[in-house]
Image: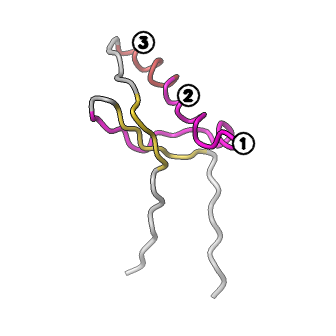
Amino acid sequence: MPPKRKILSSFVAFDVTYVDGTLSSNRRVPYTELGGLDGDEPAKTFIEAQDRDISAASGRPRPDIRSISRTPQRANVKE
């Protein structure tokens, strides 16, 4: 059986942990924002900009980001 091809997405999902302990899962960052020598550091900048926009629209400030990590890939399990 030939190996399955990976589906390339135009977004990368990140899990964000804030300083107050809250978690925001599957935050989407365009693939074009990532890469190069900076690795995933541009994702933090992009998510911080999203948070500023959300805060401005809702009137409630978002806490500072403690850490970000890529959301793990889900395994396709056939039963």
Q: Residue at x 46, y 39 (%)?
A: 27
In depth, the one of 32 and 20 nearer the eye is 20
| Left or right: 74 in relation to 35 | left
In depth, the one of 1 and 50 nearer the eye is 50
- Observer-side mark, 2 or 3, equals 2
The answer to which of marks 1 and 3 sits earlier in the sequence is: 1
Residue 45's disc is 2
The answer to which of marks 1 and 2 sits earlier in the sequence is: 1
Q: Residue at x 50, y 30 (%)?
A: 47
Position of the N terminus by quadrant: bottom right
The CA distance from mark 1 to mark 3 is 31 Å
Q: Position of residue 73 (x, y in %)?
A: 48, 60
Q: How many marks?
A: 3
Position of the C terminus by quadrant: bottom left
**Which residue is identified by label 1?**
36
Q: Position of residue 72 (x, y in %)?
A: 45, 57
**Label 2 neighbourhood size at 10 Å, few (<14), some (14-19), many (20+)?**
few
Q: Residue at x 44, y 62 (%)?
A: 74
Label 2 SS: helix
Picture quadrant of residue 22: top left
The amino acid sitting under disc 2 is Thr
The amino acid sitting under disc 1 is Gly
Magenta region includes residue 24:
yes
**Which residue is identified by label 3?**
56
Highlighted magenta segment, given as a residue range: 21-48
Q: Are marks 1 and 2 in contact (CB under 8 Å)?
A: no
**Label 3 neighbourhood size at 10 Å, few (<14), some (14-19), many (20+)?**
few
Q: Position of residue 3 (x, y in %)?
A: 64, 79
Q: Residue at x 45, y 51 (%)?
A: 71
Picture quadrant of residue 55: top left
Label 3 SS: helix
Seen in the picture, residue 68 relative to 8 is either above or below; the reply is above
